[in-house]
Amino acid sequence: MKILVTGSSGTIGTRLSEKLLEQGNEVVGADWEPNKWQPAVENLTIRIDLRHEEEMTKLPKDIDCVIHLAANARVYELVENPDRARDNMLSTFNVLEWARKNTVKQFVFASSRETYGNSGADKYSEDMVRVENCESPYTASKIAGEALVESYRRCYGIETSIVRFSNVYGMYDDSERVVPLFIRQTKKNEPLVIFGKEKKLDFTYIDDAVDGLLLILKTFEKANGQTFNFAFGEAHSIVELAELVKKLMKSSSSIDLQSSRTGEVTNYTADITKARRVLGFDPEVPFEEGVKKSVEWYGKHSLVCNLKRIIVLK
């Protein structure tokens, strides 16, 4: 297949592109940032701003499938800067329109567990998203994206699948997401700030998340028109994460507990029954093992990451 991966310079995009290439697929990346991690992926990436319709002409027209990962994905940053949520909606619309005009057969949309809000359920299945539980502009951008994707399936016959990720971590990430942030901070013995003592979330190791996407491509006839939770299926507190990273890093960092922030989901465990049944999705890396793998990966790659960051800045 010839597959367009938007957001190919990001965490999931980089790892997914690697795996697709290993399977013999032709990959076209699309991102407004260079890929600082993998030269092979960077060489396949078109520099493009998906917010602007005129930029879509940079993309090749003979694509079999789009995997749309590109988004502004930091929830609280979009509370502070809601125009970034608008950017997400514009990008999704433009990519869908480009796919329609070029008769792309298949489209996968990366959504989020944030769409479930804070309704207090023990576990969240795919049928539990409600607009009235929308907590943030980021959530709104993902719910809007899901609605657009469904409309393009119904109106234009594009085969579509929606995946709701939750706290994907593991490698290829030097952002402010909590796992790489805590690893960097514990390395310097800096305080670890936690917004919400009781906050518990479902952490998903990167390879499990990517394996789910590959399963969709393998059995798209089953995935068409379906939405899936991709996570491990267990919740762990941010306090537990902080203590584990501290232990693994042999750090003296303190833990600073603060109030939860506006717009964020505070308790989430995914029900992955549907993904297991329809796709055969079977996550293999539990929380403690995944965090240990992450610490080891960043330990081995920190120098390389810093050098690449310097090169990018220059």
Image (cartoon, rainbow, N blue to C red):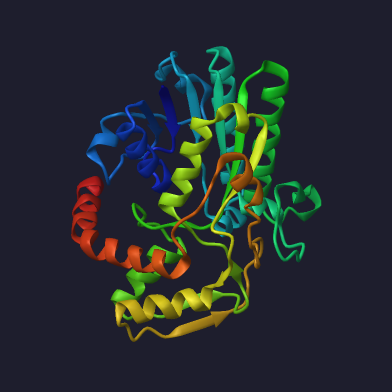
Q: Is residue 247 above or below residue 166?
A: below
Return the x and y of residue 163 as percentages of the image width and height: 59, 42
Return the x and y of residue 88 as percentages of the image width and height: 57, 39
Q: Indicate left or right for 218 with 135 as reference.
A: left
Dividing the picture into quadrants, the one containing residue 264 is bottom right
Q: Residue furthest right?
A: 132
Between 109 and 194, which is closer to the camera in this rendering? 109
Residue at (56%, 62%) from the top-left corner?
202
Q: Indicate left or right for 290 with 233 as reference.
A: left
Q: Indicate left or right for 6 with 136 as reference.
A: left
Return the x and y of residue 20 as percentages of the image width and height: 37, 34
Residue at (40%, 45%) from the top-left corner?
10
Residue 102 visible in the displayed image: yes
Q: Indicate left or right for 270 with 181 as reference.
A: right
Residue 69 visible in the displayed image: no
Between 166 and 122, which is closer to the camera in this rendering? 122
Residue at (36%, 40%) from the top-left corner?
33
Query: Which image quarter holds the N terminus?
Result: top left
